[in-house]
Image (cartoon, helix red, strand yellow):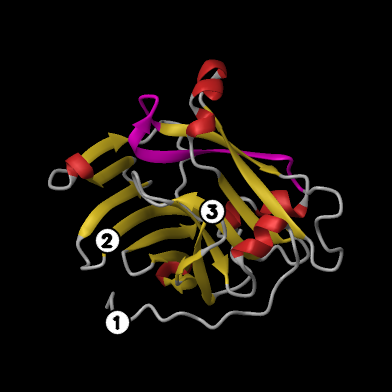
Amino acid sequence: PYPVEFGTKPASTYDVNGNRMGGGNVQIEKIAGGGVRMTVINELDSVSRHTLVAELGPTENGAFLQLLREEGKTTNQQGELIGVKTLDHRNGQLECQGGDNLKKSLVVPLPEDDRTILVPGNLLLRPLVHGEEQFINFQFATCSGIAGRHFINVRGELAKPPAGKFDTDQNIAKVDIQVNLGRILNRLVVPLLPRVSFWFDANTTQWLGHRSPTYKNGPTVITVRNETTADALLKGSSIHPATPPVSLEPAYQ
């Protein structure tokens, strides 16, 4: 579906324990041809900057959006490239630069049944928050590969909040992403993987935050809209007053 809100949402980046690591933002904008571009920026204490971009275009009937191109890029404090991952759905390929492939790209064809996504989880997972679906099945793309696979089957499922954890006035809906590598690898490998989750305001379905890894060997971080904090989401409490937005300049012009 099309987004219900546009503009730049100031955000902050936290570690998985709720300690603030830096600034960031989430931007949703209209682009030519009736499309939408979504950009997520994480700053890690001026050490690195991680940017996710998704470009979506209208379907044939114009009623919905479909993913056309996605990119995840990480640079260091000096602006030098650490890694970049590009998903081109129109040409059906995943391209990776970084690590051993920093000078020469690794190109992997997308699966024939392409259900691959880097971002944007807030549109993809909205049917769960609305209660229209119990599960959402899709795929993650990984450059380094997990158990020899570049495309990992995953499932989004609405988490059941612990009794008494959430305020009735401002419910927070949490969606957990479950990785499926098969019966044996689910026991051996999956517990070692970073946890991925999304949080929404259950009343308005607005995005509040998400937890995800940044890049290969990079930290797992929590990106949080500035109306709340990572600590509030992790503990299931209600929305907190907005924290002052953090400037992304001048380090990354």
Expressed as whole percent of the image width and height from the top left, the position of residue 166 reads 81, 59
| Mark drawn on residue 16 | 3
| Mark drawn on residue 250 | 1
Q: What secondary structure is marked by label 2?
A: strand
Front-most of residues 212 and 1:
212
Going from N to C along the chain, the mark reached first, 1 or 2, is 2
Going from N to C along the chain, the mark reached first, 2 or 3, is 3
Residue type at mark 2 is: Thr
> Magenta segment range?
132-150
Q: How many marks?
A: 3
Residue labelled with disc 2: 75
Judge depth for marks 3 and 1 and give the one in front. 3
- Mark 2 is surrounded, within 10 Å at the Cα level, by few (under 14), some (14 to 19) or many (20 or more) other residues, namely some
Between the residue at mark 2 and the residue at mark 3, the CA separation in whole angstroms equals: 21 Å
Q: Quadrant of the C terminus?
A: bottom left
The answer to whether 54 is drawn above or below residue 88 in the figure is below
| Mark drawn on residue 230 | none
Is label 1 in contact with label 2 (beta carbons under 8 Å)? no
Expressed as whole percent of the image width and height from the top left, the position of residue 155 reads 60, 37
Between the residue at mark 3 and the residue at mark 1, the CA separation in whole angstroms equals: 27 Å
Main secondary-structure element of the magenta-colored stretch: strand
Q: Is residue 198 left or right of residue 202?
A: left
Front-most of residues 120 and 92:
120
